[in-house]
Image (spheres, coloured by chain):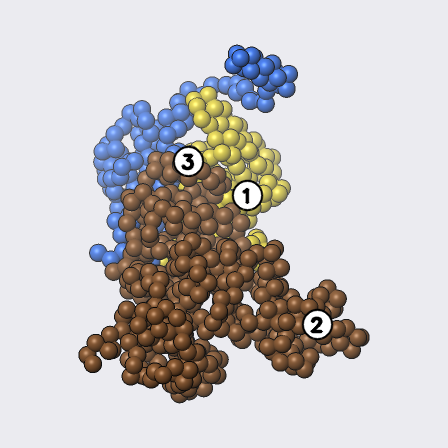
């Protein structure tokens, strides 16, 4: 089992395809859940406080807008934990955590720079491209399993 | 309840969402989000024509569109994005213009950091809420009857008497006891006329001591300085229509207000450094042994480039100026360098946070220092700077103007 | 009702339990099961779960162990058409629920868009096959010039 970061980090399709293969997709929603289930914090709706942009300083300097740093406080730990990554270019983005292009650029850069296997894909627009995407993800995941076994 | 639509990006992730809501609630307003669906977001984003990469900015554009097209009907709009985000600043300003050009809904914009607290948002929310509830008052373009405007600031208290759209008396004193200082300033203003307290139609108060004065004198209008100064400035400068920026470099703090059709829509206030205030010029004039009123004309004759000034600091900067004088530099060059230094620092600390719109109306006591006005224009790339008559009494003029029509003290006589 | 975007939620003990998680279950186009069948199956499992019908499928909430077990079972109904993902907020959490908060929910539109290609994904899972995708390249300069001249000539 490999912990795989995905981008967009809340993608249904990416998370599902990895889970099917028995791997752990590192998804944003788990991070959010951790935050909102903390009864010690009362900063609705997301329980993000001014502390989060400060925590985000680990990933981006003080001159970077607070919204980027606050988002990095949530997404950053997923990147830290990643043993592999799948980045999809041109994917539809929701709003909120992943609604900031600068945050997304930084996150993807950090993943690419992490010395872990990274698969880069383009979001499919038709049936054939979807076949190609599913195939590539499966091949990538299988190759991870092989290295995993070799290491054992 | 006044409904304020939130058109923003990054507020939740900066941890300030609750602060915004708190500030709105304090003034009897509530924050609402315009409800829209996915197709509408895509459609309005394309219609608007700004290619933003961040999807939250697309959402912001769509929310603005929903307001302009009447799908959402808020009473006011609060547009906020992260400080230092270029993409968001561009969208923020374009969305602001879009709403102002196509609706009569008042707008306030703000760029925030994680440090933003409800207190900082209060004056903006108060301005928004009062713009909604007092629109008819803010629409006033002409003063009528005999009115007194009192502006109690943290350092000085100003009084202005107006009659039939003209200033007929002014008073100025340093603020000690709020009420006593107001009486002194008012007495000075009355002295220049044949009138007294009993002849007034109405009294308007503004500034830091507005509530205390308002209660004591039974003022018909008690209004925060954001709306009052903006109104006073565009009235005196004859810029009541269209856009303008009001700059007040004060003795202790500085205000920059952007105005659209006489109504303020953004505002920054700073006061952390004496080097960016009138105090720096006060110190300079003492060092040069000239009266503060002579500093301006002196500076206009000088060239700031000829005086060495390595620091904006009121301690080190002034020392540099003394060194220049000791090395045989001219007083005029030193005066020019001091004005240039203040204007540059005001620019670096504050003017960058706001979208400056021409003309710039400079007000407050420092607007009388011609060298500073010239330096401000130069710092901003030769922008048109207007210093209207009575610019040092701006708040009191605004209060006297806005209260006219509200006071009916003579009716019962 | 006054709109309050940042209400402090009044949640039960279960809602605050970090081990209680929520999953969304999507039934893609062309599925061999209906939303109702999926929900009944969840009930039949007899696990202590909160089960909700939604516009896209269903949502279940409970202890993580039970939720994962249920997901494993439910996938068996139609492995290639049932998709699932985590959800941060529990069903009906007033901090996120549209009924309280108005405005679109942050992740919803992305989900809507991804749903549009779920059918393709199902097909790819059902009948895996190799495909060749031709990479798009910018048009050759000479070709560009030729077309441009043709267009200009046609105009005259």
Frontmost residue, B27 versus B407? B407
Position of B394 relative to C17 (above/below)? below
Judged from this view, the residue extending furthest toward the right is B327
Frontmost residue, B405 versus B14? B405
Contact check, label 3 and label 2, Cβ < 8 Å = no
Position of C144 relative to C113 (above/below)? above
Position of A1 relative to B192 (above/below)? above
Image spot of residue A29 (x, y percent): 41, 47
Query: What residue sits right under mark 2 in the picture?
Result: B332
Q: Which of the labelled discs sits on residue B46, or is there none?
A: 3
- Disc 2 residue crowd, few under 14, some 14–19, many 20+, Cα 10 Å: many
Position of B215 relative to B398 (above/below)? below
Q: What SS does tag 3 mark?
A: helix
* Distance (Cα) linking label 3 and label 2: 56 Å
Q: Which of the labelled discs sits on residue A105, or is there none?
A: 1
**Closer to viewer: mark 1 or mark 2:** 2
- Disc 1 residue crowd, few under 14, some 14–19, many 20+, Cα 10 Å: few
**Closer to viewer: mark 3 or mark 2:** 2
Taking the spot 45% from the left edge, 38% from the top edge, the residue there is B49
A81 lies left or right of A39: right
- Disc 3 residue crowd, few under 14, some 14–19, many 20+, Cα 10 Å: some
Image spot of residue C153 (x, y percent): 56, 12
Q: What SS does tag 2 mark?
A: helix
Q: What SS does tag 1 mark?
A: helix
Examine the image and state in which quarter residue C8 appears.
bottom left
**Chain C: drawing colour:** blue
Let me know if residue C80 appears in the view. Answer: no
Taking the spot 22% from the left edge, 36% from the top edge, the residue there is C40
Image spot of residue A74 (x, y percent): 47, 52
């Amino acid at each position: 089992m490999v912990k795989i970061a995905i981008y967009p980090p809340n993608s249904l399709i990416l998370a599902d395809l990895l889970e099917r293969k028995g791997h752990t997709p590192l998804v944003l929603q788990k991070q959010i859940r951790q935050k909102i289930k903390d009864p010690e914090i009362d900063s609705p709706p997301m329980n993000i406080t001014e502390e989060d942009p400060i925590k985000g300083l680990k990933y981006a300097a003080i001159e970077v807008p607070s919204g980027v740093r606050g988002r990095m406080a949530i997404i950053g730990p997923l990147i830290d934990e990643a043993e592999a990554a799948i980045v999809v270019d041109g994917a539809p983005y929701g709003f909120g955590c992943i609604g900031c292009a600068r945050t997304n650029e930084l996150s993807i850069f950090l993943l690419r720079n992490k010395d872990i296997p990274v698969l880069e894909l383009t979001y499919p627009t038709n049936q054939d491209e979807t076949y190609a995407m599913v195939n590539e993800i499966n091949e990538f995941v299988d190759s991870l399993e092989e290295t995993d076994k070799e290491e054992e | 309840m006044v409904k304020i639509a939130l058109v923003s990006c990054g507020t939740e992730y900066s941890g300030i969402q609750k602060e915004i809501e708190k500030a709105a609630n304090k003034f009897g307003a509530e924050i609402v989000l315009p409800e829209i669906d996915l197709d509408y977001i895509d459609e309005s984003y394309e219609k608007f024509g700004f290619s933003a990469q961040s999807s939250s900015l697309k959402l912001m554009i769509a929310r603005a569109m929903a307001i302009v097209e009447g799908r959402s009907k808020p009473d006011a709009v609060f547009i906020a994005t992260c400080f230092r985000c270029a993409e968001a600043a561009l969208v923020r300003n374009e969305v602001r213009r879009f709403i102002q050009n196509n609706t009569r809904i008042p707008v306030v914009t703000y760029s925030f950091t994680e440090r933003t607290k409800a207190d900082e948002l209060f004056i903006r929310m108060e301005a928004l809420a009062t713009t909604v509830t007092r629109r008819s008052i803010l629409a006033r373009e002409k003063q009528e009857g005999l009115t007194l405007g009192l502006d109690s600031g943290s350092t000085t208290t100003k009084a202005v008497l107006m009659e039939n759209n003209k200033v007929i008396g002014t008073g100025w004193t340093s603020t000690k006891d709020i009420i006593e200082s107001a009486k002194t300033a008012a007495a000075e203003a009355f002295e220049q006329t044949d009138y007294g307290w009993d002849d007034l139609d109405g009294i308007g108060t503004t500034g830091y001591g507005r509530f205390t004065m308002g209660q004591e004198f039974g003022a018909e209008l008690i209004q925060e300085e954001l709306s009052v100064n903006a109104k006073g400035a565009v009235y005196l400068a004859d810029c009541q229509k269209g856009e303008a920026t009001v700059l007040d470099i004060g003795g202790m703090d500085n205000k920059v207000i952007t105005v659209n059709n006489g109504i303020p829509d953004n505002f920054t206030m700073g006061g952390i450094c004496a080097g960016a205030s009138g105090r720096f010029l006060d110190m300079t004039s003492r060092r040069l042994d000239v009266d503060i009123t002579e500093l301006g004309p002196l500076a206009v004759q000088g060239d700031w480039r000829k005086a060495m000034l390595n620091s904006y600091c009121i301690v080190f900067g002034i020392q540099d100026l003394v060194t220049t004088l000791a090395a045989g530099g001219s007083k005029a060059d030193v005066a020019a360098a001091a004005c240039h230094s203040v204007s540059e620092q005001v620019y670096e600390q504050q003017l960058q946070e706001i979208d400056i719109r021409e003309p710039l109306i400079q007000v407050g006591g420092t607007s009388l220092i011609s060298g500073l006005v010239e330096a401000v224009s130069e710092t901003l790339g030769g922008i048109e700077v207007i210093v209207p008559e009575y610019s040092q009494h701006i708040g009191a003029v605004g209060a006297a103007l806005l209260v006219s029509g509200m006071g009916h003290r003579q009716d019962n006589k | 009702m006054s709109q309050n975007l940042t209400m402090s939620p009044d949640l039960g003990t279960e809602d605050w339990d970090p081990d209680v998680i929520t999953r969304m279950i999507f039934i893609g186009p062309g599925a061999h099961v209906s939303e109702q069948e999926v929900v009944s199956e969840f009930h039949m499992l007899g696990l202590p779960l909160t089960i909700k019908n939604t516009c896209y499928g269903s949502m279940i909430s409970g202890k993580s162990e039970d939720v994962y077990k249920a997901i494993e079972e439910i996938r068996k109904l139609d492995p290639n058409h049932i998709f699932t993902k985590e959800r941060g907020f529990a069903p009906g959490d007033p901090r996120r629920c549209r009924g309280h908060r108005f405005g679109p929910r942050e992740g919803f539109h992305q989900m809507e868009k991804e749903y549009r290609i779920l059918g393709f994904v199902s097909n790819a899972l059902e009948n895996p096959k190799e495909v060749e995708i031709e990479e798009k390249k910018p048009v050759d300069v000479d070709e560009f010039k030729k077309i441009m001249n043709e267009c200009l000539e046609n105009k005259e």
